[in-house]
Amino acid sequence: MDDSEAVFQEVGGTSLTTAQLCKDVWADEKTFAWQIHQILYDKARELDVNTELGEIAQLAQKCRKDQNFRILTYNYDDFLEQYLEWRGVKCCSMFTTKVRYSNGQASADFYGVNGQPNQSLRLYHVHGFLPKVATKSQLDTLHIRSICLTEADYNMLYNQPYSWPIASQLSFFRENICLFIGCSLSDPNIRRLLEITAYNPPKHYAILPMMYKSTDASGAVVPKQFTTKDRLQIENHFYRIGINILWVRDYSAIPEWLHKLNRSIV
């Protein structure tokens, strides 16, 4: 009897190796991209101003006249673009394809969607961009070939130090004060770039929840809260790579925190 869970554990058990196995099964790149598309959009909810993305869009609306304000995302979807459009914010969605950074001579090339970078808010999709379409046949080849999801994709990308996605991240981390929202900061590749550009004292900020999920003696999942000592250890850990921690109660409290930030901006 087949046991897919055992197979995933045997080859590494990480999200990258799982994605690699899935791509090996769906060898056709359009079929693989369509599977990703369905996961992203099939259960999408209606736009809601009181969500995290709704508050981020409002923040962008208030800061869009500042030419230094930019957004970098590791997500593939166009949900933020939808919220920005809802807010009347014109944005340029920027991405590149794997063929660009696999060839060092063309690695700086990128594509902009819905406008030019000097005319709109710039939204950088450094791991690829797969906007919503109605059918599989409507998937665009450039979007399909932009997706960096598998182990092979990540190895190729992060071994190209002059590629557009790497240069973009280094530019963000070196030249800007960044606020990390909904990002666990567990990706070793991102952490390496942060460490390269780290300042002392740190100038970046990350919102993290104090609550986390644990298991009791029976194996049941129960919510727990980091102790003061635990939070201090976490803060010291991220301080080294240039990040100050902003604690919130749990993930559901992030929109509330962003709402207060929006209210403080005139």
Image (spheres, rainbow, N blue to C red):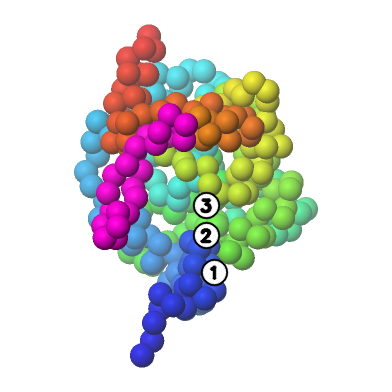
Instruction: Report x, y in % for residue 33.
Output: 44, 65
Q: Amino acid at mark 1?
A: Gly
Q: Which mark is residue 182?
A: none
What residue do we see at 60% from left, 44% from top?
190
In the displayed structure, 225 sits above or below 136; it is above
The reply to whether the magenta stretch includes residue 222 is: yes
* Dots 1, 2 in contact, CB < 8 A: no
Disc ID at residue 149: 2
Describe residue 120's horizontal placement relative to residue 87 as left or right: right
Residue lying at the far bottom of the rendered structure: 1
Count every numbered label the image shows and give the total: 3
Q: Position of residue 6 (x, y in %)?
A: 44, 77
Q: Which residue is mark 3?
A: 128
Check the image and report above or below for 114 versus 264: below
Amino acid at pointer 3:
Gly
Q: Residue 220: x percent and y percent?
A: 26, 57
Location of the C terminus by quadrant is top left
Sequence-earlier tag: 1 or 2: 1
